[in-house]
Amino acid sequence: MKEPAVLVLLSTFNGEKYIEEQLKSVLSQKGVKVVLVIRDDGSRDSTIDILKRYHNTHNESVYLYVGENLGARGSFFELMKYALSIESNYDFFSFCDQDDVWGQNKLYQAVNLMNKDGNEEQEVPMMYCSVTQMVDAELTSLTRWPNIPAKSLTLYNALIENMAVGCTIVINRQTLNLISKFPPDDPSKVIMHDWWVYLCVSAFGRVIFDEEPYILYRQHNNNLLGGKTGSIFEKAKIRICRYFKGEYYYIRRYQAREFLSCFYSVMDPQDRQAIEQFLDILNRNWIFRVLYIGRTPFFRQSMIDNLIFKLTYITGKV
């Protein structure tokens, strides 16, 4: 039986400390054929030297190109463009960070679940994501993150909350085609590449969330973004502090507008109307926002996060 082919998309930036562990774990995957495409985002340490060494010793399975510094979001969008430009014999595509450690069955598990779920509708965009095992810099276990979703993973969640940890994501070719056919006009309005993928697939396809972790998600001082540890009260305190500091004001609004603009002509009319109403009432006074928020179809997974969403909507800061 032919092994499924997975193209792994890895973006690096000044990742010399942990990149070798990451590369070894990707190249040790079982049950799938792995090809690794690496885009370095302008590293200034020894990362490129390490990557060149791996390219030279694995020249049929590791490809490297060095680009200008775009940031993680821009770098991963460039990787998706590159994935479409090469031969089309890859069945699945996976995002990869530079500082984690993958279990040997990470990709096989994702592909297996997607194949099972996709038997009836082969042409539907699909995305796999999962819980991670969070660890510290020395790989000591911390906790599992994110929490298992309590509610459905639909557009009505994805518009205001990202449940897909980028380094766990695997997508099929239909998803890649969808994202490339309707690219964002202004990528700066996209919060992150993983959130955008979750948003797109939740609207037009099928999201699979695996409750078991197959990745050690490393937390360290140089994480661009990381998971959340601590009690429910500590997490709530962090969110409330961010709110009063003005962090992340308006980013969901901008992303929602960009999504609506990209997919307006092909969206389900009910979904399109719901997003239009969500955005329209944001521009009205607080009385309209209070009346709307009690009946909004949009939601976040936890009770505290949902309350914070309602607060930010009423104050017009979404």
Image (cartoon, rainbow, N blue to C red):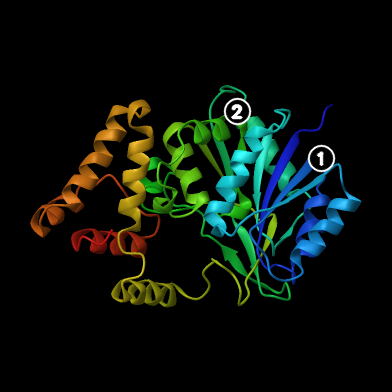
Q: Which of the 4 image quadrants contains residue 304?
A: bottom left
Left or right: 208 in relation to 149: right
Left or right: 17 in relation to 120: right
Left or right: 288 in relation to 211: left
Q: Is residue 113 visible?
A: no
Q: Position of residue 17 (x, y in %)?
A: 74, 72
Q: Position of residue 76 (x, y in %)?
A: 58, 50
Look at the numbered disc 1 and give the secondary structure of its residue.
loop
Q: Which residue corresponds to mark 1?
A: 31
Q: Position of residue 316 (x, y in %)?
A: 21, 60
The residue positioned 71% from the left and 40% from the top of the image is 7
Q: Position of residue 255 (x, y in %)?
A: 36, 49
Residue farthest toward the right in the current orientation of the protein: 57
The residue positioned 24% from the left and 40% from the top of the image is 276
Q: In the rendered view, tell whether residue 110 sits above or below residue 211.
A: above
Q: In the rendered view, tell whether residue 271 sits above or below residue 41.
A: above
The answer for how far apart the CA atoms under marks 2 and 1 are is 19 Å
* Sooner in the amino-acid sequence: mark 2 or mark 1: 1
Look at the numbered disc 2 and give the secondary structure of its residue.
loop
- Quarter of the figure that contains the C terminus: bottom left
Q: Residues within 10 Å of mark 1 (few under 14, many from 20)?
A: some
| Kind of residue at disc 2 | Gly
Query: In this view of the protein, which residue sits in the foreground, 112 or 197?
Result: 197
The residue positioned 86% from the left and 58% from the top of the image is 53
| Kind of residue at disc 1 | Gly
Q: Which mark is residue 118?
A: 2
The residue positioned 40% from the left and 75% from the top of the image is 238
